[in-house]
């Protein structure tokens, strides 16, 4: 502590600029670059009747007109769709991933090692690469189970859940291994079944990783575009990503202001979640990515 | 079957909790599988629901002849019931739900991509040969010259429309589009059918109301399409229609009854005349490696494909390099403990990462608009730089936007990695007389790379398939001219797959899948390289 105050007092004037001051300059410039698009979209959303041109003078007028226009254009529908799909995916991912991680971490069975290796291999290939085949699969499923076929939220959730095990099991598996086995052995001796150990002991102990996986899965399915675009074709079934893309890409009659308002509202939950849980998400990111 | 055995075993499992003697010592006496605890009942309900859905699926798969789905459902039900009602399959109880989804929506999808890549699946070749024969026959039907008109009534049952006719022999028959004509005991009064058991005979007003559906309805005489069908124009007289193309099942050929031309099944999955005229639709056939070579052998496509291929690598590589360089620079900049307000800087610098990526791309698309965008209008004082419509500028714009999107991630991981490098080491180097650059070059960077290199490789793989950025920012454009598929200068392989499959007029699932396989292979190699650097495998 004493050393650092000493440093602070020691560095002044020109030397301060060459050693520390320029860092602030870099920081301020970078923050300006980071914030510009975000301020721009916020300003456009507050600009009534906004077109692209009209949005260029930042914060010239402020009105909530664009926000009130969202409702009649089906925005709420998309928001609900997005929340339903992402929440269901998050919950399903957490449950299935935790169950699989529990099995791999606590049981010794034939095929365990090869199962883990297979999962490791599978997660190298993102599910989205097979979107053509997924489309054809859902096309056939439409005939048998219309509820999980093309153009259904449930079908989209199922596709997302198909990617659940590959992406998250390893992250959870590592965390499950850090919970001492003595705990479940003690419970077992006291007469707890494997299900009781799982639901009432292990899941409580690994709650942090469950939260991280759930949030990461929520955020990624919230912003997922290509599979959603392939599966959902009718505007009233769209998620926010699809709907907002349609608004922004319609260059002829684009109401830029309305798109901007929709974008701000769509971003708020994700940005809030992210900033709030920064520490966990960053930890999860680096831990998860070591997989390759 | 199995749940009976569990029910019988409940008896010795008395509430006092004494352990009954058992052949296999179980892991606790109060397992859900052997007592009617709430857990067991919940399990019973869940499995019951799954079984009910499965049986429903099996029946409806049977009805629409989806044999693959049927076989899978049977297998999945057996596995699920076995796993949850057997006492021995402990790991399976936890693995089965996730594995089922994984198998269907990931493993199967990958395998199916491989299968489709070797077929001509796509518009004009969507179905099986039998379907193609039926459709060709139905599409080429004409009224049989000189055939009698048949008294006809339009009938309805539920939502299904059908025809009832009096045949030339005086029999009454009824049928629908799906169900060929069958004899029926209908009431005929003065040449008109007035009543059909099980069917409601539609009156004139109802026929007029549903005219479109009725005039397009076609009721076949039998399952053999060459037997012809009955159609009506007015809802009261039917005419016999027969295909102008007659299918000969023995020779497997179509013959045009007017001209006598014989169409034989060709290799491409179509019936082809000796002159090379094709009947559509065709059916799915294997085409070997044609889809894989299609990009190279088609002279209109070879050049653009090569460009897209190179650009995909260049884009992924430049994205990683630029974001890493900026992220590392910022991490070093703010790693000095003497800088005040580092927390504030850090929180603000990761904002682009927190903002949903698809929205950023769309906002940038607006800002880069040539005529009205903020960049040209305000920052560059009214310039009209074609950011998104010039091939090279569009590429630069994509790299630039991706830099904005991606540097915070690199900043975060580099900060983490820098902080884990012990301070003593740099201190020692400084005492030994190393300069700032020398310390960075020979000490910091190598140590950093140990932990960051795998992340760089996975970042490369991610950007290699960064569909949404490309699709949202430029849509792949500016487009190449004269290519059979709608592809552009900024398309990467994955967005090209999308275009070939869905957006190029005729949908070519086969070619698209072949391209996907190429991506699979490349991603596989990249991941393998990354994999070798990590020691994850050893931890298993």
Image (cartoon, rainbow, N blue to C red):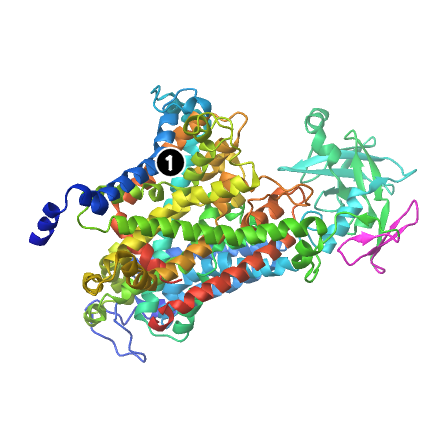
Q: Nearer the viewer, residue B312 or B378?
A: B378
Q: Residue under label 1, please give it.
A: A266
Is B29 on the left-hand or right-hand side of B167? left
Whether residue B442 is in magenta: the answer is no
Can you say which quadrant of the picture contains the C terminus of chain A?
Answer: bottom left
Vertical side of B266 occupied by B475: above or below: above
Asked if residue B363 shows in the view, the reply is yes
Q: Nearer the viewer, residue B263 or B135?
A: B263
Q: Nearer the viewer, residue B488 or A198?
A: B488
Is B329 on the left-hand or right-hand side of B419? right
- Place of residue B210 in the rendered image (x, y in percent of width and height, measured from the top left): 68, 29
Asked if residue A141 shows in the view, the reply is no
Vertical side of B390 occupied by B519: above or below: below
Q: Chain of mark 1?
A: A
Residue at the extreme left? A2
- Place of residue B301 in the rendered image (x, y in percent of width and height, measured from the top left): 67, 50
**Majority SS type along the magenta span:** loop
Q: Secondary structure at mark 1?
A: helix
What residue is rendered at 88% in x and 51% in y?
B275
Count the marks: 1
What residue is rendered at 28% in x and 58% in y?
B417
- Place of residue A165 in the rendered image (x, y in percent of width and height, measured from the top left): 40, 59
Q: Nearer the viewer, residue B379 or B94?
A: B379
Is A43 on the left-hand or right-hand side of B435? right
- Place of residue A290 in the rendered image (x, y in percent of width and height, measured from the top left): 35, 62
Is A260 on the left-hand or right-hand side of B483? left
What residue is rendered at 69% in x and 59% in y?
B290
Please rate how many residues cluster around mark 1, counting C-alpha atoms within 10 Å: few if below 14, some from 14 to 19, many from 20.
many
Range drawn in magenta: B250-274
């Amino acid at each position: 502590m004493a050393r650092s105050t000493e440093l602070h007092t020691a560095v002044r004037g020109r030397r301060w600029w060459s050693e520390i001051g320029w860092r602030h300059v870099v920081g301020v410039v970078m923050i300006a670059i980071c914030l510009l698009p975000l301020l721009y979209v916020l300003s456009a959303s507050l600009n009534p009747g906004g077109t692209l041109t009209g949005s260029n003078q930042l914060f010239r007028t402020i009105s909530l007109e664009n926000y009130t226009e969202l409702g009649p254009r089906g925005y709420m529908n998309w928001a609900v769709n997005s929340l339903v799909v992402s929440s269901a995916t998050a919950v399903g991912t957490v449950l299935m991933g935790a169950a699989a991680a529990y099995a791999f971490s606590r049981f010794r069975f034939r095929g365990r090692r090869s199962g883990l290796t297979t999962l490791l291999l599978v997660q190298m290939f993102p599910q989205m690469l097979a979107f053509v085949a997924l489309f054809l699969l859902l096309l056939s499923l439409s005939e048998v189970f219309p509820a999980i076929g093309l153009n259904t939220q449930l079908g989209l959730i199922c596709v997302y859940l198909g990617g659940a095990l590959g992406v998250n099991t390893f992250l959870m598996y590592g965390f499950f291994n850090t919970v001492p086995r003595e705990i479940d052995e003690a419970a077992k001796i006291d007469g707890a079944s494997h299900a009781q150990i799982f639901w009432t002991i292990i899941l409580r102990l690994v709650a942090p990783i469950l939260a991280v996986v759930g949030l990461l899965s929520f955020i990624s399915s919230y912003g997922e575009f290509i599979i959603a675009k392939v599966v959902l074709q009718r505007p009233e079934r769209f998620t926010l990503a699809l709907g907002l893309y349609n608004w922004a890409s319609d260059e002829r009659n684009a109401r830029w202001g309305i798109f901007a308002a929709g974008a701000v509202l769509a971003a708020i939950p994700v940005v809030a979640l992210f900033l709030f849980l920064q520490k966990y998400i960053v930890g999860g990111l680096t831990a998860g990515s070591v997989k390759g | 079957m199995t749940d009976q055995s569990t029910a019988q075993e409940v008896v010795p499992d008395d509430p006092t909790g004494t352990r009954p003697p058992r052949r296999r010592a179980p892991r606790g006496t109060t397992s859900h599988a052997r007592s009617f605890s709430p857990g067991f009942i919940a399990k019973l309900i869940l499995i019951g629901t799954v079984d009910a859905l499965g049986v429903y699926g099996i029946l409806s798969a049977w009805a629409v002849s989806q044999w693959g789905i049927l076989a899978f459902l049977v297998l999945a039900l057996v596995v699920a019931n076995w796993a949850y009602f057997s006492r021995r399959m402990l790991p399976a109880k936890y693995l089965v739900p996730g594995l089922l989804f994984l198998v269907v929506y990931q493993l199967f999808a990958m395998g199916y991509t491989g299968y489709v890549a070797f077929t001509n699946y796509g518009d004009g070749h969507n179905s099986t040969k039998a379907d193609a024969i039926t459709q060709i026959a139905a599409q080429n039907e004409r009224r049989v010259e000189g055939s009698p008109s048949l008294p006809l009534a339009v009938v309805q049952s539920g939502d299904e429309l059908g025809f009832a006719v009096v045949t030339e022999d005086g029999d009454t028959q009824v049928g629908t589009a799906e169900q060929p004509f069958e004899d029926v005991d209908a009431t005929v009064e003065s040449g008109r059918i007035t009543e059909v058991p099980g069917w409601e005979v539609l009156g004139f007003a109802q026929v007029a109301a549903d005219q479109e559906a009725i005039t397009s309805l076609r009721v076949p005489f039998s399952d053999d399409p060459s037997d012809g069908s009955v159609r009506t124009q007015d809802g009261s007289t039917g005419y016999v229609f027969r295909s102008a193309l007659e299918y000969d099942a023995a020779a497997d050929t179509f013959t045009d009854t007017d001209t006598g031309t014989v169409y034989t099944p060709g290799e491409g999955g179509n019936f082809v005349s000796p002159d090379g005229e094709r009947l559509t639709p065709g059916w799915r056939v294997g085409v070997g490696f044609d889809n894989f070579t299609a990009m190279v052998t088609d002279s209109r496509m070879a050049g653009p494909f090569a460009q897209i291929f190179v650009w995909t690598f260049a884009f992924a590589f430049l994205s990683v390099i630029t974001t890493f360089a900026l992220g590392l620079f910022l991490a070093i900049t703010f790693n000095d403990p003497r800088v005040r307000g580092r927390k504030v800087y850090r929180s603000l610098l990761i904002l682009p990462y927190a903002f949903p990526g698809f929205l950023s791309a769309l906002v940038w698309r607006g800002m880069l608009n040539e005529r009205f965008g903020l960049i040209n209008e305000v920052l560059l004082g009214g310039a009209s730089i074609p950011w998104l419509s010039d091939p090279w500028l569009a590429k630069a714009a994509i790299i630039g936007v991706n830099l904005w999107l991606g540097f915070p991630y690199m900043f975060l991981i580099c900060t983490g990695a820098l902080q884990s490098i012990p301070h003593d080491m740099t201190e020692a180097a400084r005492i030994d007389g190393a300069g700032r650059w020398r310390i960075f070059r020979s000490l910091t960077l190598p140590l950093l790379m140990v932990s960051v290199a795998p992340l760089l490789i996975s970042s490369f793989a991610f950007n290699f398939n960064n569909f949404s950025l490309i699709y949202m920012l430029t849509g792949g454009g500016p487009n190449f001219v004269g290519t059979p598929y709608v592809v552009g200068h900024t398309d990467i392989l994955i967005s090209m797959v999308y275009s070939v499959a869905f957006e190029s007029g005729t949908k070519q699932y086969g070619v698209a899948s072949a391209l996907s396989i190429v991506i699979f292979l490349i991603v596989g190699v990249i991941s393998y390289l990354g994999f070798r650097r990590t020691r994850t495998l050893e931890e298993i």
